[in-house]
Amino acid sequence: MKTVFSPRHLGHANQLELVAGAIVPGFELTSRAEYVSGRIKTVGLGPILPPQEHDLTTAARIHRQDYLDFLPTIWDRWTAEGRTGTALPFTWPTRGLRGDVPPEFIDGLLGYYAFDAGCGIVGGSWDAIKSSHDVALTAAGLVQDGERAAFALCRPPGHHAGAGFMGGYCYINNAAVAAQWFRDNGAKRVSILDVDYHHGNGTQEIFYSRADVQVINLHADPMQEYPYFLGHADERGTGEGEGYNLNYPMRFGTDWDRWCQALEDACGKLVAYNPDVVVISLGVDTFEKDPISKFKLKTEDFAKIGERIARLNLPTLFVMEGGYAVAEIGVNAVSVLTGFEGN
Ligand SMILES: [Zn+2]
């Protein structure tokens, strides 16, 4: 399997985030992607290719243009106020406030275009965000050109980013952009299967009223876990999209036996939808030792995920999302891919 990966992700480094009452070094570390690329070389998964530059035309079909225009300007607006460190929001337009008028000042804009304080921006962030987007589209191109599967080793990840907001370490929704690109290049239907521990709220929001992209999420119950405000089982899509959004929320402590029942049911629904291509939002933070998660999947379970996805017998694009037990993230993510390949 070919991997697409960019060293430009390294510019998105040393960003801070707000966790449990403290501003701390972000869990979304540069080493995450380096562990995965290292493991790909160790097991000989296949060549690692650089991304080709893509413009933001496809991204603008699923993200708001004003949001895409804002992202590259954040760091300059921040430093223009004499600030350093990490650009982070601290005020949000929640219920009772106006969410329809973007303010002028940077602090207001950050809150307007974010839903949490887990989306810090530093000097190299935009270049990394753009390269991650390019990685996803370049890997999508490999699948379009006939590869059975390809791996977009994206960093930063994307599935929490909605049409007009960032959050949860995500800025551009790489998997959603890839799905839209497949639609624009001949696929009649695309399925996105999100196996990250956290609900892919951004992906759900983007496609919620559409029938041409099925979105399936297996994740921690939002009653217990981030992102808290989306991801319940009764969210099934709206209008033309009704029935094309499927959520499998699961409680803290979920192990492989329970998790793979949800995967099996999800695969049945996916096959019934009969897509031309499947995009996997590949998070491995379901791992039992993940520092920010509470599921109990073991290393040997990740190959079984890949084996099951392979049996869908569909062109498959894997897009890297979460996974934070840095020492094991490479082994677990690449186990999904080698499991897919039958090794
Ligand atoms: Zn996650």
Image: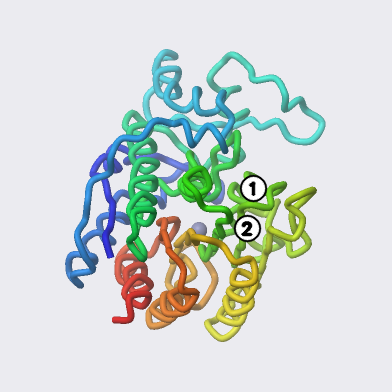
Q: Which residue is mark 2?
A: 214
* Residue occupying the far bottom of the picture: 257
Amino acid type at circle 2 is Gln
Amino acid type at circle 1 is Phe
Residue 18 can be seen in this image = no
SS at mark 1?
Answer: helix
316 horizontally vs 215: left or right: left
Q: Residue at the spot x=21%, y=62% of the render?
A: 38
Q: Residue at the spot x=78%, y=62% of the render?
A: 234
SS at mark 2?
Answer: strand
Could you say where residue 250 lies in the image, as x and y percent from the top left?
65, 72
Q: How is the image coloured?
A: rainbow
Taking depth in this image into account, of 9 and 153 the one nearest to the observer is 153
Q: Which residue is mark 1?
A: 207
Could you say where residue 235 lies in the image, as x and y percent from the top left?
75, 57
Taking depth in this image into account, of 243 and 90 the one nearest to the observer is 243
Q: Residue at the spot x=42%, y=33% of the render?
A: 121
